[in-house]
Image (tube, coloured by chain):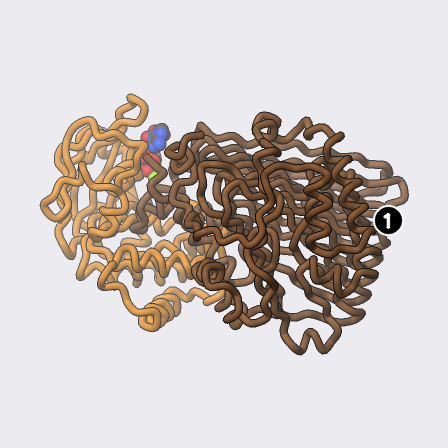
Chain colours: A orange, B brown
Amino acid sequence: MLCIENLHVSVDDTEILKGVSLRINLGEVHAVMGRNGSGKSTLANVIMGHPAYEITSGDIKFKGTSLEEMEVFERARAGMFLSFQYPSSIPGVQVGTFLRKSVSAVRGDEAPSAREFRKELKSHMDALEMDKSFLARYVNDGFSGGEKKRLEILQMLLLNPTLALLDETDSGLDIDALRVVAEGINSITPRAGCLLITHYQRLLDHVKPDYVHVMIDGKIVKTGGADLAVKLEAQGYDWIEA
Amino acid sequence: MSGDIARDAVGDYRYGFHDPENATIRFDKGLSEQVVRDISELKNEPDWMTEIRVKAYHRFMEMPMPSWGNCDMLNQIDFDAVTYFLRSSEGTEKDWDDVPDDIKNTFDRLGIPEAEQKWLGGVTAQYESEAVYHSIREDLEEQGVLFFDMDSGLKEHPDLVKKYFCSVVPASDNKFSALNTAVWSGGSFIYVPKGVHVELPVQAYFRINAKNMGQFERTLIIADEGSSIHYVEGCTAPTYSTESLHSAVVELIAMEGAKIRYSTVQNWSANVYNLVTKRGIAHSNATIEWVDGNIGSKLTMKYPSVILKGEGAHAEVISVAYAGKGQHQDAGAKVHHLAPNTTSNILSKSIAKNGGRSSYRGMLQVTPKAKGCRSKVICDALMLDADSQSDTYPTMEVGNSSADLEHEASVSKVSNDQLFYLMSRGHSEEEAMGMIVNGFFEPFTRELPMEYAVELNRLLELEMEGAIG
Ligand SMILES: Nc1ncnc2c1ncn2[C@@H]1O[C@H](COP(=O)(O)OP(=O)(O)O)[C@@H](O)[C@H]1O
Ligand SMILES: [Mg+2]
């Protein structure tokens, strides 16, 4: 479903991704691990189409079409979703309004009626243990780290993507919140592919990855199964570089 | 300005239609003492009003143009090309069905009568120089609330008008208040008796239809002790390649413990000069609130002000300005703290786009007598592109050291990360921009009656369309 071929990406003439290849099929969970600054967020952002990054060579295909000509919002409407490491705040825009508008933008003709939408929203918010007072607040404005991450997962559940890119969605969450977020991810993965960027084994206790990739200096240097994450947690990254 | 350029400048202004002009009385273009006398005579005014007008006319002729704001644009105004009085209807109707069809047609397209039925306590609709329709709910009338168009107000309650007319904004305040005082026509006159709370807002709607028209409405609102009222006004005009002049004066008087809120959404087409003087006096423990939105016009110069005259009086000025291509919004607020323990909040938000210019001009005065007063001023500007301009001219005159004053100003740009975030949720760049802009204005919008808020959001979203790339 997602097919990345020898991808090179630069920002302001500095190369950040130096030949990344990756294939994600429907129903697969791919964990990407690596030190800070190795290029993980860049990979997620460039898949979603962030304008700051320039693809200097290589290609990304989603469901068989090259993403090159697709605008960010078209990618979203085609079923891609990015949970941001650092979600932006949008002062003055209420969460409730934003969610309703986003659902109708992404799901288009298949968007639920107002009534169904409220029902869906309530059931997801209950599952994520979010109070309905969230809906009247401004998007990410003055949110704690954990609140931002919950709102990202709430959006994922409502937008129902076929490809979810989750960038450190587990960072800054306590154990209970982590479990709740993990349940959210597990509820979409049978129908979706998932790229899970994380530093910690503890999320992978709840969301079982099919593949674990290690990224160092803009390249995927090693790929293994779930046990690779366990080994990284215990031994760090030095043994791979050696 | 050629027609094409004018159309380009105003874009897809949706109130830009105009209806045939069926004037019953139209004065020749240009201004003279005779024109002023003729207006007064036509309206059968008492002599004292004629004298006020004539004196004001001479003040207008003597006074120089303001030397600030936008002098280039101001000096383009051709006072000889303006029509100073135009009557389109024989009278002011109380029944919507009696309004002449062509005028009714205009207001129907603007959605006026529907709004009245749904959520208003009274409504007045002014077309060119005079009110064509006016109504007030019976229950308000029974409580003694006076709500008239200004011409009728003068006829019915000359004593009240004489007492307060020009008491807040003297004719000689500035060149345009002098002009308004000389040739005023229409506007609203409101008196709320002691202790009466007018729960539903009353609305005035101003429409310029004719070319080169000058609209000079005059509004006077008196809220007696412990009373309250919310007055809402909206304005539109057709899109012509020649310019129109709108120069209003609004005077508010809030007696002890009274509260007046005055909300405006000004959406003149981009060929209208909008030069308005708005000022209120707040007596002890009274509150005056200006909620002022400027979306349209070519040049707006308007600084709603409050004189805090009595101890414990409060002023609130919330304003937004949107300046698109060819537009200059020179707006702001003025508050004069004359008495102890007076308080004020000023929030100004402006957006400039496509080479537009928005300026904040503010004045905060604290006299030596105003011990223990508090004031907070916040000015935020949002730039949507590099061609646009935003500037602030805050002035403070502080006469005592016990005042607690805060001033915050910020200029921000829409960040790529915000746009990317919204676009990743399925919104096009224009839609994303519209959401950010509406969010930026939200502290203003939430103060408006819901119908106005919805309309304003829609307008701004339209402004964002087709403007990026
Ligand atoms: N928008 C950007 N502008 C400049 N440098 C960037 C930008 N995004 C990422 N980088 C640089 O690219 C490298 C990889 O960053 P990132 O992808 O965020 O890493 P990770 O998510 O693995 O911590 C870092 O050196 C970072 O400074
Ligand atoms: Mg990162």
Q: Quadrant of ligand 2?
A: top left
Q: Position of residue B382 (x, y in %)?
A: 51, 38
Q: Amino acid at mark 1?
A: Ala
Q: Is residue A126 above or below residue B416?
A: below
* Mark 1 CB lies closer than 8 A to ligand 1: no
Residue B44 rendering spot, x and y as whole percentages: 73, 56
Q: Quadrant of the C terminus of chain A?
A: top left
Under tag 1, what secondary structure?
loop
Q: Residue at x 55, y 45 (%)?
A: B294
Horizontal side of A231 relative to B383 (left or right) equals: left
Residue A61 in the image: state x and y as whole percent: 13, 42
Viewer can see residue B109: yes
The residue at the point 62 percent across, 36 percent down is: B30
Count of numbered marks: 1
Q: Residue at x 22, y 64 (%)?
A: A110
Q: Report the front residue among A59 and B311.
A: B311
- The chain carrying label 1 is B
Residue wearing tag 1: B339
- Of all residues, the one furthest to the left in this rendering is A64
Location of residue B88 (image quadrant): bottom right
Furthest-right residue in this view: B369
Q: Is residue B444 visible?
A: no
Q: Position of residue B62 (x, y in %)?
A: 76, 30
A139 left or right, relative to B409: left
Residue at x-position 73% and y-position 48% = B279
